[in-house]
């Protein structure tokens, strides 16, 4: 196997990719409609009553509440919105109190930003509420007025309640609707994984590059886990299993199995792709995976509509064309297990996707599960960790959350000092940009700062054009409705587009409240650039925790969990580990290491050092994980064969070396050289007589897989050696 060279891109290509990349989801039309209604109606009422400022404040309260909607089951959403609403109102009161003096304002920003960042350990909803409430404290200088405190607090309360009504009452959520949405997203992630399965696949003379497929598989695993949690939240308050809940859980588990089989398929491609004969079936295999991709997207669309009958005749036709070619190829090389494994994997993929299509149809027709898959699912247990315990654990400089909270608080306060000391017009935009842009890692901050500045510049210029052309208040109100709709519709689609729409919307709101000039748009641009630059500097100078320093521990976790996966697969040790659980832990650890490696590329060159051995260390660990995953979906009788007495000593040697690599990465010391007898492991089958596979048996697949694992462990050992020597 050839070492994989990391993809290198110029800074310009990197910046372009940041602007074109998609977000976590598609266009959220319902959120866009809520935003248009939630912002426009209070503003219009205020305009009609002669109190436009009051109407705008109410609209902002609704907008803040809508931004706190992170989805989920109806009951979860209601609790989240209630808690977020209280935090938003508390932030308004706190902001009104601290803005009585410039010193109090700066200290208040520091305290609130620090506290709310720490509270983010409670989850995404708490983190989002903390972010929105921090921006309220920052902009409190223009929201509050001492002589109107109570009336403005009442207006904010009305706005929060209006936003909650829009989320929970005017659009009542069917109990299973969030589950349909998240499962639909998981189906889309499965299609993305299929899209990536040929990206970087090996060809004659070229090695494999598994970056894209690893990231896609990580996204699928994350989405499937979210689906399981939402399923548990929906089911936990309902008595007994229902047909609908059983079908949905069946669909989630099918998605998980399909993803594992696709990874096994990619593992076979990595092994066969460089062989000359493979080109004869490459086009047919790509056509087959294209059919699966289209089918996955159809299933995703059907699930979003609560089920639909899927026509899978195209899949059957593709299988009918492909299998005879694979059978012919396997017959030509009778003892080549890889060709037989390729044919078997194709059959498994076809069967799994047929099941997915059938289950999706059952959601529409209401039929019971087919007999061959009917089973009573165990209800997932919701893990409830103590928030106080989690918070106490993070009150340490060793915690990245604590350090980020301190960094964000300090940077926001510094931005407040700049705005106050120089009496900058609408200077609150500077600390607000810092709050939104600054991320725990430098690469993420740089990434978000570039996106935010681009979106703000474009949005401010667009707003300046609108405000120059439109002078009628009611026309501006219609424009506000359109921009509000665009803002929340684009929220999860593309951050640059979201920033553009948000900037233009805020500029129009400000012009409605206090008609300004085109100069205000350019001030917004200038302040955003200042805030973005300050966030980048803070990420670089204030308590930095560079990916280079964190990577060894993350890579150590990847190697140690992969060793556990290998031990579970080969049934090593006294305690029998769960193959499924160890595969999940290993897959997440490897994906986390890969993501950290990509973040490393965003850091300054003089700090990140030589990235080649780092990325090689990650790549080879991932190759080992893929090989183990391919073996894990073998039939039970074959799993029993690889756990034989002749195979276990070899597996134990491999597991021991993976443990040593993990320990080496933890200690920062180069691993000890491989023992001389390790180099002889590739010929292990020639040294055994009882039960040893030979060239004429049906067990040729055993040395095939083990030799691949041995080679990968050797390459990983060499990469870790180079990485530690560079350190």
Image: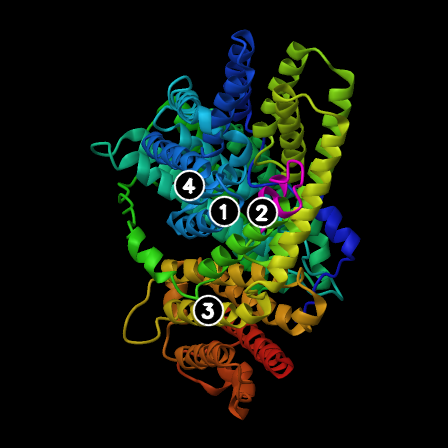
Quarter of the image with the C terminus in it: bottom right
Whether residue 40 appears in magenta in the rendering, the answer is no
**In which quadrant of the rendered view does residue 237 lie?**
top left
Residue found at x 29% / y 57%: 389
Find numbered disc 3 in the image and state the secondary structure of the residue it sits on.
Answer: helix
Label 1 or label 4, whichever lies nearer to me, is: 1
Which sits in the foreground, 593 or 654? 593
Residue 353 image position (x, y, % from top left) = 50, 40
Which sits in the foreground, 132 or 667? 132
Q: Within 10 Å of the Cα at label 2, are there few (<14), some (14-19), or many (20+) other Cα atoms?
A: many
Whether residue 431 appears in magenta in the rendering, the answer is yes
**First along the sequence among labels 2 and 4:** 4
Q: Whole-Å distance between the Cαs marked 1 and 4? A: 21 Å
Residue extending farthest to the bottom is 676
From this view, report whether residue 125 is shown above or below residue 607.
Answer: above
Residue found at x 62% / y 71%: 614
**First along the sequence among labels 1 and 4:** 1
Q: Which residue is mark 4?
A: 125
> From this viewpoint, is residue 626 visible?
yes
Which label was assigned to residue 599? none
Which label was assigned to residue 109? 1
Q: Which residue is mark 2?
A: 416
**First along the sequence among labels 3 and 2:** 2
Q: Which residue is mark 3?
A: 557
Quarter of the image with the N terminus in it: bottom right
Magenta segment range?
420-438
From this view, report whether residue 330 is shown above or below residue 123.
Answer: below
**First along the sequence among labels 1 and 3:** 1
Residue found at x 31% / y 51%: 387
Q: Whole-Å distance between the Cαs marked 1 and 3? A: 37 Å
From this view, report whether residue 702 is shown above or below residue 512.
Answer: below
């Amino acid at each position: 196997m050839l070492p994989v060279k990391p993809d290198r891109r110029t800074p310009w290509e990197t910046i372009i990719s940041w602007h074109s990349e998609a977000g976590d989801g598609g266009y959220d039309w319902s959120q866009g409609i809520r935003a248009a209604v939630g912002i426009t109606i209070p503003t219009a009422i205020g305009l009609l009553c002669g109190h436009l400022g009051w109407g705008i404040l109410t609209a902002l309260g609704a907008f803040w509440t809508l931004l706190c909607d992170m989805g989920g089951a109806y009951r979860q959403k209601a609790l989240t919105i209630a808690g977020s609403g209280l935090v938003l109102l508390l932030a308004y009161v706190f902001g009104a109190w601290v803005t009585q003096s410039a010193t109090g304002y700066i200290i208040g920003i520091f305290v609130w930003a620090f506290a709310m960042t720490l509270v983010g350990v409670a989850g995404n909803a708490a983190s989002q509420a903390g972010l929105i409430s921090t921006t309220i404290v920052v902009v409190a200088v223009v929201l509050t007025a001492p002589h109107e405190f109570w009336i403005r607090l009442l207006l904010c309360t009305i706005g929060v309640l209006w936003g909650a009504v829009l989320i929970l009452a005017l659009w009542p959520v069917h109990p299973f609707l969030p589950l349909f949405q998240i499962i639909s997203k998981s189906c889309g992630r499965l299609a993305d994984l299929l899209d990536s399965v040929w990206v970087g696949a090996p060809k004659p003379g070229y090695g494999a590059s598994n970056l894209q497929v690893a990231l896609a598989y990580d996204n699928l695993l994350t989405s499937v886990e979210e689906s399981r949690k939402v399923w548990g939240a929906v089911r936990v308050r309902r008595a007994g299993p229902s047909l609908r809940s059983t079908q949905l859980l069946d669909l989630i588990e099918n998605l998980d199995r399909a993803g594992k089989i696709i990874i096994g398929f990619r593992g076979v491609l990595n092994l066969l792709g460089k062989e000359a004969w493979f080109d004869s079936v490459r086009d047919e295999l790509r056509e087959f995976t294209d059919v699966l991709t289209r089918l996955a997207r159809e299933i995703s669309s059907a699930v979003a509509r609560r089920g639909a009958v899927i026509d899978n005749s195209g899949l059957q036709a593709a299988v009918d064309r492909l299998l005879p070619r694979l059978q012919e190829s396997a017959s030509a090389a009778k003892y080549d297990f890889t060709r037989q494994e390729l044919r078997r994997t194709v059959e498994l993929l076809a069967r799994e996707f047929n099941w997915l299509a059938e289950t999706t149809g059952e959601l529409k027709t209401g039929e019971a599960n087919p007999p061959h898959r009917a089973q009573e699912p165990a209800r997932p247990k919701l893990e409830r960790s103590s928030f106080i315990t989690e918070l106490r654990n993070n009150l340490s400089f060793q915690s990245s959350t604590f350090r980020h909270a301190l960094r964000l608080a300090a940077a926001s306060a510094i931005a407040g000092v700049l705005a106050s000391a120089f009496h900058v017009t609408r200077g609150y935009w500077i600390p607000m940009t810092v709050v939104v842009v600054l991320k725990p890692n430098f690469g993420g901050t740089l990434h978000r700062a570039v996106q935010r500045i681009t979106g703000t510049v474009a949005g401010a210029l667009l707003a300046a054009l609108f405000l120059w052309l439109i002078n009628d208040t009611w026309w501006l109100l219609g424009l506000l409705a359109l921009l509000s709709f665009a803002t929340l519709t684009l929220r999860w689609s593309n951050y640059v587009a979201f920033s553009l729409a948000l900037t233009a919307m805020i500029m129009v709101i400000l012009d409605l409240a206090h008609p300004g000039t085109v100069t205000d748009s350019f001030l917004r641009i200038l302040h955003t650039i200042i805030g973005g630059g300050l966030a980048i500097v803070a990420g670089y100078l204030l308590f930095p925790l560079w990916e280079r320093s964190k990577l060894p521990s993350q890579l150590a976790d990847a190697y140690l969990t992969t060793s556990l996966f290998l031990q579970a697969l080969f049934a090593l040790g006294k305690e029998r580990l769960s193959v499924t659980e160890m595969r999940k832990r290993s897959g997440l650890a490897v994906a986390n290491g890969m993501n950290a490696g990509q973040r490393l590329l965003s850091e300054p060159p003089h700090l990140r050092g030589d990235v080649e051995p780092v990325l090689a260390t990650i790549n080879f660990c991932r190759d080992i994980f893929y090989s183990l995953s391919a073996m894990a979906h073998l039939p039970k009788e074959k799993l029993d064969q690889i756990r034989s007495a002749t195979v276990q000593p070899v597996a134990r040697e491999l597991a021991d070396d993976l443990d040593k690599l993990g320990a080496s990465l933890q200690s920062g010391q180069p691993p000890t050289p491989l023992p001389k007898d390790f180099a002889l492991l590739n010929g292990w089958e020639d040294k055994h007589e009882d039960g040893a596979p030979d060239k004429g048996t049906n067990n040729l697949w055993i040395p095939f897989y083990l030799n691949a694992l041995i080679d990968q462990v050797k390459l990983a050992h060499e990469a870790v050696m180079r990485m530690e020597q560079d350190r």
